[in-house]
Amino acid sequence: MRSTAKYLIGFFGSFLAVVVVVFAAHLSSLGAAVSAPKGKTAATEKTRVVTSIQPLSFFVEKVGGEHVDVTVMVPPGANPHSYDPTPGQMVALGRAHLFVKAGSGVEFELDWMKKFTGLNPHMAVCNASLGGRLISMPEEEHGHSHDHQHGRIDPHFWLSPRNGILIARNVERSLAEVDPSRAGEYAENRKKLEVQLEALSAEIARKLSGMKNRAFMVFHPAWGYYADEFNLIQIAAEEEGKEITPKKVRRVIEQARRHGIRVVFVSPAFSTLQAETIAREIGGITQPIDPLSDNYIDNLRRATDAFVTSMQ
Ligand SMILES: [Zn+2]
């Protein structure tokens, strides 16, 4: 844990740096177009894009191709439910043309988006889940738990190929708005990606068809949209970002036994201690699956194979 003082110095240091960068950008734009639209880039320049989380960078790179320069805020292995940006990232943000957010309630975005757009008011913002159906976090199976927030939106919108198609469309629209001269190219790239995502969705559905047992257990509840698309039951040990109580651990063990579950899937960014306790109690194992990979298609394929094996 860092001290508050150090944090404040870091934050205001980066704030100053961003002010300088933004001010310099204003000066240099004085000689250019009189009223450049929000986030617009010159035709020869790459569009500088910042995304909150890694999977979104996959979509920007696929749709934007060689015309984008992508930076990710939450680095590999960090937890988007609690990550704070570095001063260097704040400077990159000050130079960005476009920010792509999940828009589905990721804590990092809830905590930081206002500051980001405040520091760089010229930056366009793409809401990757715009027009999508947001679902609620899984509810308790029995009665009412009093430390449970009912109706909280599940932020892990990107983890379903159907939603991936929507993300690609939203990213395409934003890139075309920031850089209209390449709109045709972005549309072409997006269509190619859409074909791949349709094929991925069909492939996953095929692999899961005929599975009688359709329940899988994850420690962190990241796979609700995936379960929703493919008609599976996600049993989650943890509620969004919280340590689980011994009582909840006992209840989860009961659920796992009832569903004949032997694998507890864990996310790389989270502690696996409690997951291992649960796995030991059910005579099973823990196995990692990554909800934040930037290798989107291969990762969903890998996760599917792991789910299939665990449900057999
Ligand atoms: Zn999460």
Image (spheres, grey):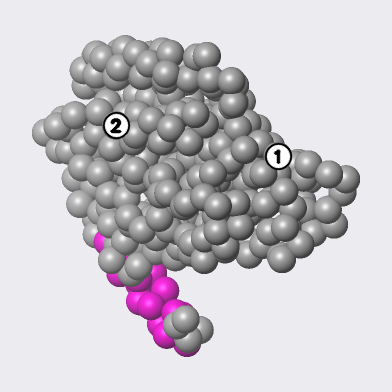
Q: Residue furthest front?
A: 283
Check contact, mark 2 vs mark 1: CB within 8 A. Answer: no
| In the image, residue 86 lies in the stretch drawn in magenta | no
Q: Nearer the viewer, residue 19 or 184?
A: 184
Q: Quadrant of residue 281?
A: bottom right
Q: Residue at x 21, y 36 (%)?
A: 68
Q: Is residue 121 among the parts visible in the rendering? A: no
Q: Residue at x 78, y 41 (%)?
A: 141
Tally of marks? 2
> Which element type, helix, strand or loop, lies under badge 1?
helix
Spatial CA distance of label 2 from label 1 is: 31 Å
Q: Nearer the viewer, residue 87 or 251?
A: 251
Q: Residue furthest right?
A: 143
Q: Residue at x 67, y 62 (%)?
A: 244
- Reading the image, the residue beneath label 2 is 298
What segment carries the magenta color? 5-22
Side (left or right) of 234 relative to 5: right
Q: Residue at x 59, y 20 (%)?
A: 212
User: Whole-percent x and y of residue 146?
Assistant: 85, 57
> Which element type, helix, strand or loop, lies under badge 2?
helix
User: Mark 2: which amino acid?
Assistant: Asp
Crowd class of label 2 (few under 14; some 14 to 19; many from 20; radius 10 Å):
few
| In the image, residue 16 lies in the stretch drawn in magenta | yes
- Reading the image, the residue beneath label 1 is 258
Side (left or right) of 31 relative to 153: left
Q: Main secondary structure of the magenta part?
A: helix
Q: Nearer the viewer, mark 2 or mark 1?
A: 1
User: Mark 1: which amino acid?
Assistant: Arg
User: Whole-percent x and y of residue 182?
Assistant: 21, 21
Crowd class of label 1 (few under 14; some 14 to 19; many from 20; radius 10 Å):
few
